[in-house]
Image (tube, rainbow, N blue to C red):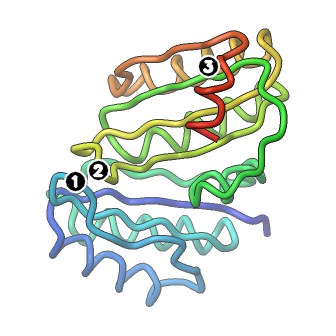
Amino acid sequence: MSKAIGMVEYKTVASGVVAADAMVKTSEVDIIEAQTVCPGKYIVIISGDLSAVRAAVDNAKNLHGRYLINSFVLGNPHESIFPAIYGATAIEDVSALGIVETYDATSIIVAADEAAKTAIVDLVELRIARGMCGKSYMMLTGEVAAVEAAIERAKSVVAEDGMFLDSSVIAHPDAQIRNAIL
C-alpha cells in the first residue's frame, strides 16, 4: 500500500460537505483540506493509502455526481506537493520561475505532480481556487531548462482536460519579484 492523495471539486457547498463526510466514513483517510473556494465551490483533498483514497473518491463521485466538477487520485505523489499546498516551501535560489494557471482546482495538483516528476524543480506554491474565482495556479523554480521542461509537461497534462489557461517562464527573475513571491 502506497501513500496517495485524492481530491473532489463540487459546484455546491452542500454537495461538497456531504461528500467530505462520506469520504472519511468510507475509508481510513485524512482530510488535508475541505473548504469553500471561489465562486462558491467546495473542494476536499484527502490522503492515505492508495486503495483507501480511491474508495473514498469513488464513493464521493457516485454520491453527488451531478454536482461534481472534477476529481483525481494520485498514487505516490511527489513529496513537494504537500508543502506547496500550504505555501510552506523554503526556496533559497531562483534561477527561473515557472507559472501555470488553470480554470479549475483539481487539475493544478495533477499538473504540479507531473511537473515535479519531470525535472528537478521546487514547487513553491499551489494556489487552489482561493481568491481566484475558481481558477488555480502553481509556481515552481529551478534551473531554466528544468523549469521549461516541467512547465511544458504541466501544460500538456492540463490541456488534455481543456483546463489550461496560461503559463510563463521567467529566466533569472528580478530580486524584487523573487522577494515578492518567495
Nearest to N terminus: mark 2 or mark 3: 2
Q: Which of marks 2 and 3 is in front?
A: 2
Circle 2 is placed at which residue position? 131
Instruction: Name the spot of residue 85 as percent of width and height, x first.
Output: 57, 56
User: Residue drawn at (40%, 18%), measured in percent from left and top?
Assistant: 166
Q: Residue furthest bottom?
A: 25
Is 144 placed left or right of 115 in the picture? right
Q: Which three-letter amino acid code belongs to the residue tagged 3? A: Ile
Measure the C-alpha gap from mark 1 to mark 2: 6 Å
Nearest to N terminus: mark 3 or mark 1: 1
Instruction: Name the spot of residue 17 as percent of width and height, x first.
Output: 26, 78
Instruction: Name the spot of residue 153 as percent of width and height, x first.
Output: 63, 19
Instruction: Name the spot of residue 168 as percent of width and height, x first.
Output: 52, 14
Circle 3 is placed at which residue position? 151
Question: For numbered disc 2, what is the local secondary structure?
Answer: loop
Tag on residue 38?
1
User: Residue drawn at (79%, 19%), measured in percent from left and top?
Assistant: 95
